Amino acid sequence: MTATPSRHPGLNLGRAHQEAHDACEVLVFGFWVFMMSDLIVFGLLFANYVTQLDALAGGPGPGELFTMKSAFIETLLLLTSSFTYGLASYCLKYRHGRGWLTAWLGVTLLLGLAFIGFELHDFHKMAGEGGVPSRSGFLSAFFALVPLHGLHVASACLWMVVLMVQMCVHGLDTGVKTGLVRLGLLWHFLDIVWVGIFSLVYLGGLA
Amino acid sequence: MTLNHFLDLALGRLDWHALPFWEMVEQPTLSHIVNGSIVTAAASLVVLGALATVVLITRYGKWKALWSDWLTSVDHKRIGIMFIVVALVMLARAIIEAAFMRAQQAVGLDGGFLSAEHFGEFFTTHGTIMIFFMAMPFLTGVINYVMPLQIGARDLSFPVMNSISLGLTAAGAALIMVSLVLTPFSTGGWSGYPPFTEASFNPGAGVDYWIWAVTLSSLGSTMTGINFAVTIYKERAPGMHLFRMPLFCWTALCTSILMIFAMPPLTVATAMLALDRYLDFHFFTQDLGGDMMNYVNLFWLFGHPEVYILILPAFGVFSEVFSTFSGKRLYGYKGLVIATMCIAVLSFTVWLHHFFTMGQSPSINAAFGIATMLIGVPTGVKIYDWMLTMFRGRVRLTIPMVYALGFLILFVIGGMTGILLANPSIDYQVHNTLFLVAHFHNMLVPGLLFGMLAGYQMWFPKAFGFRLEQRWGYRAAYAWIAGFMLAFFPLYALGLLGMPRRAVGFIEPAYLPWTIVAGIGALVVLFALFSLVMQFWLSLRQRHANRVPVGDPWDGRSLEWATPAPVPEYNFPVIPEVSSRDAFMREKDLGQAYQRPAEYRDITMPANSALGPILTVTGFLMAFGLVWYLWWLVILAGVASLGALIARSFVRRTTKVIRAEEVRETHEAWLRQVAETPAVTRDREQETSNRGRPAAPVSGAVQ
């Protein structure tokens, strides 16, 4: 047992951040519920993808379109960014100062942007090989699932930038702290979704 | 850039043909003139209604009050009332549409007066409005108003998000209203099945109106669900254990859980259909590997839980009505809770019964048929619990009770036809006929609308401080019940005779007597709607005589009745401590109601926010731009939405403080009023002497 009982799943800010910790109880719970709802969206798109695996309509399939190398690099980028976000969370919780916090957030942001960059490059390459969503049911399903994850990552990056600006304007206040806790959940959540995409879409498609 | 090129960019695909009277001007045939005149009249009503509202608000100088007391308010009570206003406006439109459809079929032998296109728009808007813009806002409004009061909370967990939910729903409703002026609307039915709704068959703006209206509504409802669930889990007053909550809160909880999990499939389905139509994806098309069955599965993965999203809150209202107006504890409380939860879980296991005939193997159909029949068990438990609540109670036949009794009988009949339809082999015989239409109206009119109307009659005095007029109220209730039976029981017969649903006309003379009776039923329902309007109007005029400032006109049992009517913004001067079920009734029994708290404290409440109304406008403009290909508008409104959200995240003063002194003065003034008000017994609760303070029940009454 720790001194501060955990009040929500995930990293708790604890007693040293009493006001933010109290605010987190409802905010973080609400965010978990939102993620459950969001997970249904991804679950349905996964299901749709699986049902459309054979709907190639004579167009290119996974073997022609996917490359393991870039999918693997994307995976590494995203997993590393989760780790660095974890470090940022610890800096927040144990009050290592705004410098370190900003630094780790910055690294996370760069990794996230690099991930998006690689992904866009992939899509561009796929389009060059005739892999566009209007080509087949399979490609439609792919372009519903994978870019939606990318869109989530992009939104999370935007949120991170907004929080960093808020930190400049308001300092490390309760609003920023609770925002960072929730963004952390979203970031790790998107990582888990990507693990699903990597396993099912890329590993499954190239196996 | 030429002028034409500029106009193309500026106006997208909007042109003269969007005007409702254009077709009859271009081709003045009889059919075009009849249909065109109907749409033009409706469009004029929309425009004149909007203009009249603007003129009236300006004339009485109410813009400021509208903005600061209502539109930017994040008070759950005001947002609840605004939800219900949206619902009632849309209810009026959809009932009038229903009357047109009944009129068409009453004279539909070998023709009728409506064109097939126009009839298609009628049944599509009727269904879409009734589900997404009448039922959903109505139940959301009632839960919004009542639930926080019943659990002893000051507001929802996320008040600004609540305002955004309202805004998105209102934007969707506005989009449907605008589709009357800049036509057409979809003809694809409320379920919008592709491939009919794909661009290859329906290239016009109609389906896009439907897609974006429904999408706005589904996003709003998802947020509503999250908000309600978190509130019930996190904001209950001390001592308000889950099993001490009024049953209405349990049904609200189950409904919000269903919203959280069942709205995403709808959002996904409409978004994918939009991608098909706008960006040439192939999810549901007939060619290039599209599979329309994926749409059907997604839609009903939402659609079936949706039925219970609609009905469970009404079950909650009826539970309150039966126990309040029988002067008795709710019978079988735990059984009702468990039954509600069972229904919520089972609702996810039956979606396939909406398309038994669309190609599954018999064994899959059998499994889903059995699951469907199982839902009858917990529902049956509820029916018996409600009857046993009345048993040996002191039943008062008030207006909510009339609705509740009508519900009890009609809902059982509807449920039995549901058991018939759950049997796949019977479903094969009657699917896609009016039998089905009769069945789901039989569930939703008594099961949802009667519940909401009963709730409206019961809680209106709580919200506005005066009781509703009685005579027209009774007329409305009886007309609803009679009109419903006349309008829908003939449809069972028509269905068994083989008349397909959504048919603009027919050539079988045997149908005619039944369609005429159904048409008469629609007239009775119109009278019911008129009675509700009359009741509201007379109530407004008699409001001084019918005031109930003490706030407990029906000898209520739960905490909302412990507050003044209308309820102050902060709900409770001091958060109540709860020690049992039926918390307020217990206080009254022990003579501990209306206490002066030991001390008053400052109360922190969420401050007003303009984010809700801003997103209403930007959400509407974005959807409107998407419908008519006004890409500049889509981009501008999208950027504005995002900018508003980010700007809001920088706001730090999100609360305001109400001083303890002010709370004390208000509360003590009310307590003095309570002390001065004579208590009235239940047999006089409908008289003007009822000022909202009930006399203790006669000894021997069953508690």
Image (spheres, coloured by chain):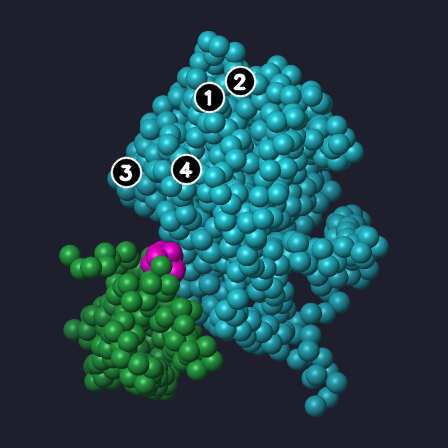
Chain colours: A green, B cyan
The numbered mark, 1 or 2, whose residue comes first in the sequence reads 1
Residue at horizontal 39%, vertical 76%?
A172
Sequence-wise, which precedes: disc 1 or disc 4? 4
Mark 2 crowd level (few <14, some 14–19, many ≥20, 10 Å Cα) = some
CA gap between label 1 and label 2 equals 7 Å
- Mark 4 — residue? B577
Number of callouts in the render?
Answer: 4
Q: Nearer the viewer, mark 2 or mark 3?
A: 2
Query: In this view, which residue lies farthest toward the bottom?
Result: B1
Q: The residue under label 4 is which amino acid type?
A: Glu
- Image check: B678 left or right of B242? right
Q: Are marks 4 and 2 on the same chain?
A: yes
Instruction: Magenta stretch: give its range.
Output: A23-35
What's the distance in space between the residues labelled 1 and 3, CA to CA? 50 Å
The residue identified by callout 1 is B589
User: Which residue ends up furthest to the right in the rendered image?
Assistant: B59
The tag earlier along the polypeptide, 3 or 4, is 3
- Mark closest to the chain's N terminus, 4 or 2: 4
What separation in Å lies between label 3 and label 4 (alpha carbons)? 47 Å
Determine if the magenta segment contains residue B595: no
Q: Is the residue A112 above or below the residue B374 in the image?
A: below
| Above or below for B112 versus B490 | below
- The answer to which of marks 1 and 3 sits earlier in the sequence is 3
Q: Amino acid at mark 3?
A: Ala
How far apart are the two marked residues, 2 and 3, measured between alpha carbons? Answer: 53 Å
Which residue bears the numbered disc 3? B367
